[in-house]
Image (cartoon, helix red, strand yellow):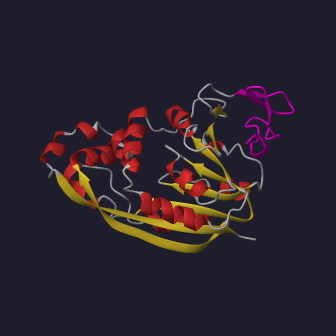
Amino acid sequence: MADLLACPECRLALEAVDRALRCGRGHSFDIAKQGYVSLLTGASTKMTGDTAAMLDARAAFQGEGHFAPIAAAVATAVGPVGDRALLEVGAGTGYYLAAALDAAPGARGIALDVAKPAARRCARTHPRAAAVLADAWRGLPVRDGVLTGVLSVFAPRNPAEAARVLDADGRFVVAAPTARHLAELIDQLGMVTVDPEKDRRITESMSGLFEQVDRAVIEYPMKLDRAEVADVVGMGPSAHHAERARDPRLAALPEHMEVTASVTVSTYRRRA
């Protein structure tokens, strides 16, 4: 994947040399034994990445197929990929990138995340995906115009950088929760709420760089047991605020309950 990446220090192209990536000015970045490369440079990032426990909970929940309809919608939104390349920002477990790559047998992918546990996990997520440790807000360590799709699923967005790395026909696919997402759990467990204006704010942040070409609402009921509820609580932003997965209020919930999944999947195209 070195042909897609750029040096985070000087923006020159990177090349694979032994177990490292190097640019023409001599900046070198070792490939970790776990298979990812760290392109995170400078002072410590202010971004809060997912913990290993959060990623374990997310992998367990995703592994049960509860978010499969969302992953399928994201893969469809990317459109024809051919043999081009995709990037998932804030990839976490790499679940959505892997679904998109499975739908595009000739494509390659980059899973980018600011958390080291995520980079380690993403290095194993798909045979055609590379894992990169980087802070998307500092700039994507990717060459100009080399990607046909950028994915942001429940993750931060950097529209200016997405526009830079996409080719002329590239698509930026953004999936975000609606106010109805996990609504049955939010009040009972004191989870972080979703801003009802989130969808509008996302679209406004894209103006000038992108135009929206499609928008779909993916909403359906999930039948969860108490352990799966603990996973869905422990894998998201609420886990940063408290040990929600150990919350005694979980014991008061029914052993099985119906919980709503509700997400918008919006597709944007670069403006000319």
Res. 267 image quadrant:
bottom right
Relative vertical location of residue 38 with respect to residue 268 in this rendering, above or below:
above
Q: Which residues are magenta?
A: 1-30
The answer to whether residue 176 is left or right of residue 169 is left
Magenta region's main secondary structure? loop
Q: Residue furthest right?
A: 24
Residue 27 point in image, percent of width and height: 79, 28
Q: Quadrant of the N terminus?
A: top right
Q: Residue furthest front?
A: 105
Does residue 146 belong to the magenta stretch?
no
Q: Nearer the viewer, residue 247 or 83?
A: 83
Residue at horizontal 69 percent and vertical 56 percent from the top: 106
Looking at the rendered structure, the number of numbered marks drawn on it comes to 0
Residue 74 point in image, percent of width and height: 53, 62
Residue 145 point in image, percent of width and height: 77, 56
Residue at horizontal 26 percent and vertical 54 percent from the top: 224
Residue at horizontal 30 percent and vertical 58 percent from the top: 182
Q: Is residue 261 visible?
A: yes
The answer to whether residue 217 is left or right of residue 13 is left
Q: Nearer the viewer, residue 220 or 180?
A: 220
Relative vertical location of residue 48 with respect to residue 157 in this rendering, above or below:
above
Q: Quadrant of the C terminus?
A: bottom right
Does residue 14 belong to the magenta stretch?
yes
Relative vertical location of residue 43 with respect to residue 129 in this rendering, above or below:
above
Residue at horizontal 36 percent and vertical 56 percent from the top: 66
Q: Is residue 204 visible?
A: no
